[in-house]
Image: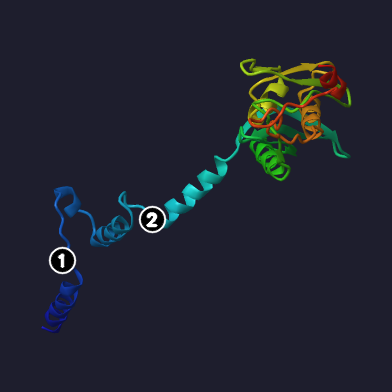
Amino acid sequence: MTEEIKKNEEEKIEEPVVAVEEIEVGDEEAKKVPVAQLKSKGRRSFGAPNGGDRRRGGRDNRREAEKSEYEQKIIDIARVTRVMAGGKRMRFRACVALGNRNGKVAIGLAKAADVTNAITKAVEQAKKDVFILQIVNGTIAHEVKHKFGAARILLKPSKQGTGIIAGGAVRIVLELAGVKNIVSKIFGTNNPVNNVKCVMEALKSLKHVEIRAEKNNKPGEPKAINNPTDKQKE
């Protein structure tokens, strides 16, 4: 008798814990899901339409916006070795160029034991050294020649419709910088890393040009006369 009384008391205690009637379930498959999972799904769907968390989605959108600000391209990946006391130490070197195609451009060079780590380190290094280039009518301000080590490069401005006439790593940097019309020539080495560094130094050496409106020949004002004696002769 005592055992039956204990069983009846346990059944009475467990009955109010399970509250299936409070949850409205439409699908037959969903009825088989435990109550705890249904409650958690209900809270998630209230926060976001797809059952996710709004705060997490907002953070992901911010990170994507920061990443999409600059476009990055890999210029060169090489396997390098360093002679140590116990033998050779192998690592990977990555050279990456990034820019927003609107005047901002930078390059990064880094080493790591893995290729992906080397690329990420190069990108982080490039973001710290972003250079703002002045673009005048889709081209550079003036002609420039520069030398870096064995690399020698010539950059010349060009008219609209010319495009980017460049080769190798120089073309990648100019495209990411946002230059649309330019003519370039590589005279020295074909090493992409040295050529990229030479291009960056050449762009940084450009002079800042102030664009002024034409003041001469305004309506209501006389034209400028070079020789006043010519007016007296007339």
Residues 89 and 46: in front is 46
Name which quarter of the figure residue 127 lies in. Answer: top right
How many marks overall?
2
Q: Residue at x 56, y 42 (%)?
A: 67
Residues 128 and 182: in front is 182
Q: Residue at x 89, y 26 (%)?
A: 149
Q: Quadrant of the N terminus?
A: bottom left
- Residue 193 percent location from the top left of the image: 77, 27
- Residue 4 percent location from the top left of the image: 12, 79
Real-space CA distance between mark 1 and mark 2, rounded to the nearest whole angstrom: 24 Å
Which amino acid, by three-letter code, is at mark 2? Asp
Q: Residue at x 83, y 23 (%)?
A: 226
Which amino acid, by three-letter code, is at mark 1? Glu
Q: Mark 2 falls on what kind of element?
A: loop
Residue 22 - label: 1
Q: Residues within 10 Å of mark 1 (few under 14, many from 20)?
A: few
Q: Mark 1 falls on what kind of element?
A: loop
Q: Which residue is mark 2?
A: 53
Q: Quadrant of the C terminus?
A: top right
